[in-house]
Amino acid sequence: MDHTHLGRSGLTVSRLCLGTMNFGWKTEEADSHAIMDRAHTEGVNFFDTANVYGFDAGKGRTEEVLGTWFAQGGERREKTVLATKVYGSMTDWPNDTFLSARNIVRACEGSLRRMRTDWIDLYQFHHVDLRTPWEEIWQACETLVAQGKVLYVGSSNHAAWQIVAANETASRRNFQGLVSEQSHYNLLTRHVELEVVPAAQHYGVGIIPWSPLAGGLLAGVLEKAGSDDGGGGRRNEERNQKRVEKHRPALEQYEAFCRELGRAPADVGLAWLLHQPAVTAPIVGPRTMEQFSGSLAALDVGLDEAALARLDEIFPGYEAAPMEYAW
């Protein structure tokens, strides 16, 4: 497993990040523990979660599963770079959502309690809060950092100008600011190349792509749909079928090119992200051990300039703004 620094920080993380969103509701606790143990065995030390994950089993359930895993000892917590998020509502009460200083501090305490840990390595804003000033947000984070409860801070789903505003405000307060940004980024969804990626490069913010395989569309969806199993799960959902049809011409070219390379489409999709500027680690969110094992193969895929150029032909990206739309 290759490792790298998270953005401009000195924190070392694996080139793949284990997303735990399915743990505790789609993936049973024991199976979730087994996947996390396997991740450590393979050198994956970067785990991502959020306080609201758990869904049908209840918000917070996924963090509780991590907590019971850490409680087994064996330096599980010490070897893990733990990332969680704050923003979404945990209750119906008005102050238990968004990024007020009150919610940031109280939500952090809740996450620490559920995960049975004394600190969070990377505390992330799950979404932008346009009504709370950055001065207030950073005041809360400075308190948590001073208390040793949070070590680094990141964002998710933020625009470039919001990353700029965040880090410029942090700089005026002599605070480190954002070191990472979780963005929706894959071969089919490349809008962040316009401004988010350039801003991240400028400020030393590591990009952590979520949905790296576009909800399965880049995992060989056409080939699987034609296999004996006839597909399953999300592939048969009406919404996903509409997405497949919308992108069918590009997906047909993509899967044919992957066959030329002799690589699985999912491996190529992840490998492509690992070749992109500012990307620290794509998030893989397995439901099963088999899915997690499959994602590891992407680390062995090397894409030369010709292969990268061909993928750009199939899935055109963007130049950095304003060159994309102005002379």
Image: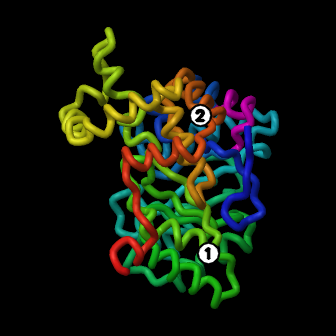
Q: Quadrant of residue 31?
A: top right
Q: Quadrant of residue 203?
A: bottom right
The residue most toward the top is 228
Q: Quadrant of residue 219?
A: top left
Circle 2 residue = 298
* Residue at image coords 61%, 34%: 301
Q: Position of residue 273 (x, y in %)?
A: 54, 48
Q: Main secondary structure of the magenta part?
A: helix
Looking at the rendering, the stretch of residues picked out in magenta corresponds to 36-45
* Callout in the foreground (1, 2): 2
Q: Earlier in the sequence, mark 1 or mark 2?
A: 1
Up-down: is 239 above or below 234?
below
Estimate how packed mark 2 is, as few (under 14), some (14 to 19) or many (20 or more) residues with alpha carbons within 10 Å. many
Q: Are marks 1 and 2 in contact (CB under 8 Å)?
A: no
Circle 1 residue = 203
Q: Secondary structure at mark 1?
A: helix
- The Cα–Cα distance between marks 1 and 2, rounded to whole angstroms, is 28 Å
Tally of numbered tags: 2
* Residue at image coords 38%, 61%: 191
Up-down: is 259 above or below 44?
above
Amino acid type, mark 2:
Ala
* Residue at image coords 32%, 9%: 228
Residue 231 at least partly seen: yes
Amino acid type, mark 1:
Tyr
Q: Secondary structure at mark 2?
A: helix
* Residue at image coords 81%, 39%: 75
Q: Nearer the viewer, residue 137 or 97?
A: 137
Up-down: is 116 above or below 151?
above
Q: Nearer the viewer, residue 156 or 327?
A: 327
Q: Position of residue 21 (x, y in %)?
A: 48, 41
Q: Which mark is residue 146?
A: none
